[in-house]
Amino acid sequence: MGLSKDDYLSTCWWNWSPTESAGPVQANVTTNLMYNVDCFEEAGVDLPPTKVEEAWSWDEFVEMAQKLTLDTEGRNAADPDFDANNIKQYGVMFGTDWNVYMPFILSAGGGYLNESMDGLGLNDEKSAQILQNFADLINVYHVSPTAVQKNAMPSAATALAAKQPAMYIDGSWNHLDLMNSGCNWGVGVLPIDENYTTFFDGGSLIIFKSTKHLEASEKLYLWLTNPESSERITELYRTLWMPVQTEYYTDPDKIDFWASEELPARPEGFQDAIVKATYDHAVVATEINVKNFNEINTLVGSALEQVWSGKKTAEEAMTEVKSQTDSLVEGTYSGERS
């Protein structure tokens, strides 16, 4: 009886040091590409790939987003007569927090921290270019809404169902709402065609070392992280959460238990695009690994608002905020760059 670290994914433990840990996360989520199937069919373009080896390059992704962005006259963003001031359907929307841009930065060889892990790394050339790529979707290609426009739009699932964007890059926690939205939706791998890197993420369940109820606490841990512990827990793992135990990514029967594509929240291609792609290419999530992450990321998020609005380049904004964040940087818990 008791928790065994060997049963859990190595990337899903909140480690404070090589010998200290807060335990496993309760459940996983991951960053993914979601889309409205009808938008693709109406545009006459191929659906996003679900296998990592077939992933779009960023340029291919931008080209697809242009084809899927329509003005009120039905012209797409690749048309010379496209009216960027009157758009009825955007090609893509994306979350603007770390979980969206970090898979792309890590895949490109950049990092949230610099190589020596004693300062912010988002101003480095590789990292800043990724951030600029996302900003350019808004301000150069006009295939994604501005922050003001996005604030007036509903949640990801509702927006996709209403065809406000054709694609949405954000967390897998949206799958439950998509299931309930009535949207004809699908999932694909992220548009990363080299060194595909992603992560699992989730919140930790803390057991205080001073507890007088260690055995009961461990039982609760085991129950909450077991997809088969109860009907309600099973429902959550089949719609909203992803497991944290390794066997649910390696045993075909266990995979089908929570990720069968016959389940309403698991569309065609889910096992390749979400289960396999994440399990095969996951590193420790930045949020879990970087010390003082919340304090640093609050400053970074505020600075990035200037980037999304087009008021500053990514390099300018991240270089400026670096002077505020570097005093907070104390490296990572794993000792490896994140």
Image: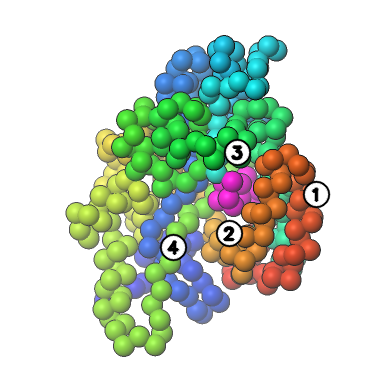
Sequence-wise, which precedes: disc 2 or disc 4?
4
157 sits to left or right of 49: left
Between marks 3 and 4 in the image, the one whose residue lies nearer the viewer: 3
Amino acid at pointer 2: Thr
For disc 1, the marked residue is: 316
The structure residue drawn at horizontal position 42% and vertical position 27%, both measured from the top left corner, is 162
The structure residue drawn at horizontal position 39% and vertical position 88%, both measured from the top left corner, is 210
SS at badge 1: helix
Query: Crowding at label 2, few (<14), some or many (≥20) Cα neighbours within 10 Å?
Result: many
Decide whether residue 101 is among the magenta residues. yes
Q: Which mark is residue 286?
A: 2
Sequence-wise, which precedes: disc 3 or disc 2?
3
Q: Which mark is residue 203?
A: 4
Sequence-wise, which precedes: disc 3 or disc 4?
3
Q: Which mark is residue 20?
A: none
Amino acid at pointer 1: Glu
